[in-house]
Amino acid sequence: MSRVNSYEAEAHVAQMAVLRKLLIDRVASFSDLARSMNLTTDYANFHIKKLISGGMVEHVPKVYGQYRLTRKGKEYANRMDTDELVIEKQPKLVVDICIEQDGKFLFQERHKQPYYGFWGFPTGKIRWGETIIQAAARELMEETGLTATLRVVGTHHKLDYDETGAMLEEKYLILIHGTDPLGDMVVENETHTNYWLTPEEYRQIDKRFGDIDETLQHIRADTGFISETEYHYQANSY
């Protein structure tokens, strides 16, 4: 399963113009594409070849001199702001894994940037093609060496800003509740240290993410939730 789109997100503006043309017109000739780039034939040919080698554009079979987007090209170009000719930046989609055992919860102390030294639940980005539970199970194993019975609880939209109001990060955190953990926990690696803590012990930590009491309410509730919160951090925290 391919997880990474190897084509550069900051592609040359001429190549973005070609992608836009084919996104709207479906099929175009070389001369049409060259005009969309406003380039000479040689330069237009160079950029079209780059798109073909990147798997974004292909020749229309059995039709001379016509081009179209590949499936990969369609997926990529569909994320484009067609007015500005840039790929739109979007929030991260992340699983936030709350593992519970005997009144304690699994927390991590981060040993990597950003938010170095902050504490919170194990988290990880959802990969292309994964279900939410598959992503949570994979991240839990990678981060802790454990397995657990997992369920989706709800979604929290987290917007992080610095003290000037500039955005630092934006995430949709899908809260996962896990019970009956099994395996030998990996206590520490180069990016984090794992701890079992009671909610009271976690409340005593200064540099922590989120509200443990709010999380406890969510995992004990009978219904799911959707929430949204803005957080503000000092510049040296990020």
Image (cartoon, rainbow, N blue to C red):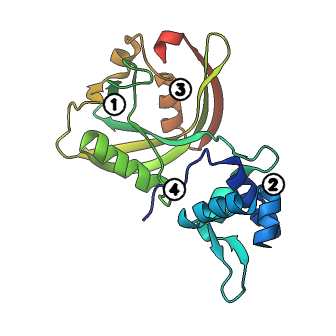
Q: CA distance from mark 3 to mark 2?
A: 55 Å
Neighbourhood count class around disc 3 (C-alpha, 10 Å): few under 14, some 14–19, many 20 upward: few
Q: Nearer the viewer, residue 28 or 198?
A: 28
Is residue 224 something that shows in the picture?
Answer: yes
Neighbourhood count class around disc 2 (C-alpha, 10 Å): few under 14, some 14–19, many 20 upward: few
Q: Position of residue 101 (x, y in %)?
A: 29, 36
Per the image, label 4 sits on a secondary structure element best described as loop
Q: Is residue 192 left or right of residue 205?
A: left
Neighbourhood count class around disc 1 (C-alpha, 10 Å): few under 14, some 14–19, many 20 upward: some
Image quadrant occupied by the N terminus: bottom left
Task: Check disc 4 and report the residue beneath it.
Answer: 5
Give whichever of discs 3 and 4 has the lower sequence position.
Answer: 4
Tag 4: residue type? Asn
Q: Is residue 225 left or right of residue 44?
A: left
Task: Check disc 1 and report the residue beneath it.
Answer: 105
Extreme-bottom residue of the structure:
62
